[in-house]
Amino acid sequence: MGVFDGEGSINSYYQRGNWTLTCSVTMAAHDIVALFQKTWGGGIYIRKKPTAGGLILHQWYLSASKAIPFLEYAAENALYRRDRAKIALELARSMAKYSAKGGRMGANVSLGHKVISEEDRANRNRLVLELRRTAGARSRFDPDYQPPEPGEQAAPPAIMRPTREQLIHLYLEQELSASEVAASLGCSAAVVRGTMHYYGIPFRNRSDAARIKRARRKQAAQSPIGSSSYITT
């Protein structure tokens, strides 16, 4: 279970009106991935695009009710993913109630499939939300979910977020670029841009960026030492 704790995942997806469940392990070592398939079944998918380091990744996957034996084992023996495995096991068992050989669950009455009850559908939605919450995620299917207003953006963590005053002084008054502001505050440019969006601080347009760039070039040309700077919006 150590490999699954480190390289595995349990995910749910909303597809064609139903929730699906997938357990997977992704890594470059094909022998280990093949061992998961030999032990628990499922399939192996080889990603065509290599990683930045040139490695080809292999992914073992097991879906829906077929994952029940594996999830039973993971619910007892996993460490980091034990709670997720327990929730996923209950979800997989719910899916097994509506599984039919050679067909999708709760979908085709003419083939003898059962139509999922409202009670079981509500229970399945609850389990999916619990599964996502254990990963720190939110869902539009959560009854407590409040979508952001148009133009709104969630704030970056406060521990790394610049203050509004700092951004106004450095970006608007000193006319530094987002990258330069980030360098001076010890954070990333993405955090600077996200925090500006959060506070409603306007980004400069291309003409303003070009104007500042020309001014800097002119100042650098007049400087006895000379320097070059680049402005980004």
Image: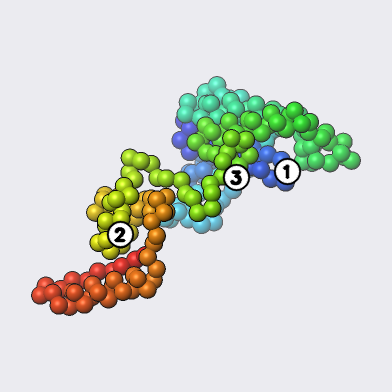
Circle on res. 17:
1
Q: Residue at x 28, y 72 (%)?
A: 213
Q: Is 102 situated left or right of 133 in this image?
A: right
Q: Quadrant of residue 40?
A: top right
Considering every residue shown, the one lying at the far top of the view is 76
For the residues marked 3 and 1, what is the alpha-carbon distance in whole angstroms?
26 Å
- Mark 3 and mark 1 residues within 8 Å of each other at the beta carbon: no
Q: Report which residue position mark 2 lands on.
A: 171
- Residue 3 x/y as whole percent: 48, 34
Residue 111, placed above or below residue 202: above
Q: Residue at x 63, y 42 (%)?
A: 13
Q: Is residue 38 visible?
A: no
Mark closest to the chain's N terminus, 3 or 1: 1
Q: Secondary structure at mark 1?
A: loop
Q: Report which residue position mark 3 lands on.
A: 44
Q: Is 9 situated left or right of 14 in this image?
A: left
Mark closest to the chain's N terminus, 2 or 3: 3
Q: Secondary structure at mark 2?
A: helix
Which is closer to the viewer, label 2 or label 3?
2
- Mark 2 and mark 3 residues within 8 Å of each other at the beta carbon: no
